[in-house]
Image (cartoon, helix red, strand yellow):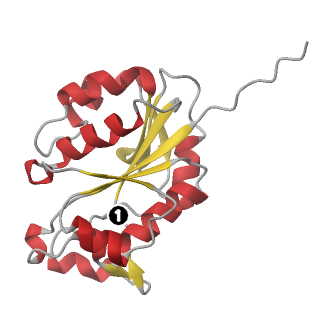
Amino acid sequence: MVHTQRIPVVAGVLLAAGGGRRLGGRPKALLEHRGRPLVEHAVRALRNGGCGPVHVVLGAAAEEVRELAALSASEVTVNPSWEEGMGSSLRAGLASLSASDADAALVLLVDQPGIGAEAVARVRSAYRSRSSLAAAAYDGERGHPVLFGADHWEAVSAGAVGDQGARSYLRAHRDAITLVECSDVARDHDIDTAADLKHLE
C-alpha cells in the first residue's frame, strides 16, 4: 500500500480592514496601485507565493471593497469590530481558518505594496510543521509576512488585542522564529499617512 504524503496547506490571511484614519478615512484596501485596488495586489502576492486558500479580512467600507475589487476566488470575512485595531482582524482571520484543514496561516497586511510573491514564497518555504513560526526580515529586523503554524493560532488569538496584532506573542517566542531575509526582493514600508502614498504606483 502506497502512502502518499499530504502536502501541507498554508493558507494566506490578508488583513485588509483598516479605515485609513491618517489618510483622511480612505480605506486602505481601496487605495489604487497600478490601476487596481491595493487589496487585489496583496491577494495576488499570497496566491502567486504559494498560499491557498486565501482568506481576506475586510472591515472599513467592506461592501464597497467587495463591489470594486475582484475577490471572488478568496474567502472573505468581514470584521465588525475592525475599529478596535489589527488584533480583532487577526482574530477574525484565524477564526475563519479554524474549520479548515490548513496547517499554517501566512499573514500579510494590505498596506505594504512593496511585498510581493517572492517574499511570500520565501516565508512559506520556512514551513516545517504545525508548530512552525517564521517571519520575513528586512536587514535582520522582523517584518511581514509572518507564518503561524496551526499549533499557535489559539494563543496568538488570545493575545491579539488593539493594534498589537501578534507583536507580544512574537516577542515572547522570539527564539522560536525562523527569520527569512527578504530585503533583496521586497520593501516593507507601510501606507499610513499621506506622505506614504508615494509608495503606490
Front residue (pair 187, 165): 165
Q: Quadrant of the N terminus?
A: top right
Please indicate, yes or no, whether residue 60 appears anywhere in the rendered image. Answer: yes
Where residue 86 sits: x, y (%)? 19, 48
Q: How many marks?
A: 1
Where residue 85 sits: x, y (%)? 13, 49
Tell me which amino acid carries mark 1. Answer: Gln
Where residue 171 sits: x, y (%)? 25, 29
Q: Is residue 166 left or right of residue 118?
A: left
For the point 33% across and 62% down, which residue is it?
Answer: 110
Q: Secondary structure at mark 1?
A: loop
Q: Height in image: 49 above or below 194?
A: above
Please indicate, yes or no, whether residue 116 appears anywhere in the rendered image. Answer: no
Give the quadrant of residue 154: top left
For the point 41% across and 81% down, which residue is it?
Answer: 36
Q: Is residue 156 left or right of residue 81?
A: right
Where residue 130 sits: x, y (%)? 51, 22
Q: Is residue 186 left or right of residue 20?
A: right
For the point 41% across and 22% down, which residue is it?
Answer: 176
For the point 50% across and 47% down, which residue is it?
Answer: 181
How many other residues sit within 10 Å of disc 1, few (<14), some (14-19) or many (≥20)? Answer: many
The residue that disc 1 covers is 112
Front residue (pair 201, 179): 201
Q: Height in image: 51 above or below 47?
A: above
Q: Quadrant of the C terminus?
A: bottom left
Extreme-top residue of the structure: 1
